Image (cartoon, helix red, strand yellow):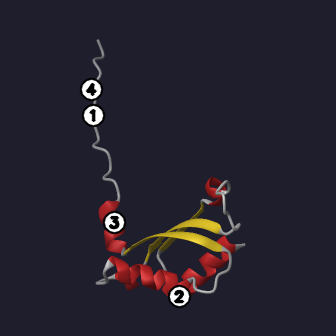
Amino acid sequence: MSKALLETHIRAALHPELLEIKDRSKAHSAHELSDGGGHYEVLVVAEQFHGLAPLARHRLVYAAVEGVPDIHALSVKAMTPEEMRQQAPAAPARRTFHLATD
């Protein structure tokens, strides 16, 4: 349920071009003092982050999800669309092979 709420809150506040949410709770279920809260990783790509320092970007995301219950940990990667395009892997070089037809 929290994953859906995270998505709703982030989309409403930041209008991201891209939003990926990964639920990593199962990897942390054996913690000795686990309170059952979720562990999430979010990638938010939004124009609103333009010109902001990483800390300011994270604060915007944390403010967007304030009040969402059952979040134990939240890992945030926040970037602008331009930064996302710069990180995209380049297309592989095209190679042409000529086969002998003897």
Mark 3 touches mark 2? (CB < 8 Å): no
Taking the spot 29% from the left edge, 64% from the top edge, the residue there is 86
Taking the spot 36% from the left edge, 79% from the top edge, the residue there is 55
- Residue designated by label 4: 98
How far separated are the C-alphas under marks 1 and 2? 48 Å
**N-terminal of the two: label 4 or label 2?**
2
User: On the rendered structure, is 58 left or right of 5?
Assistant: left
**N-terminal of the two: label 1 or label 3?**
3
Disc on res. 96: 1
What is the secondary structure assignment of the residue under circle 4? loop
- Residue designated by label 3: 85
Residue 98 x, y percent position in the rendering = 27, 26
Residue 49 x, y percent position in the rendering = 37, 82
**10 Å crowding of disc 1: few (<14), some (14-19), many (20+):** few
- Residue designated by label 2: 13
Q: Which of the two residues, 34 or 84, is positioned nearer the viewer here?
A: 34
Q: Which of the two residues, 32 or 49, is positioned nearer the viewer here?
A: 32
What is the secondary structure assignment of the residue under circle 2? helix
The image quarter containing residue 52 is bottom left
9 shown above or below 93: below
Front: mark 3 or 2: 2
Residue 102 x, y percent position in the rendering = 29, 11
Q: Amino acid at mark 2?
A: Ala
**N-terminal of the two: label 1 or label 2?**
2
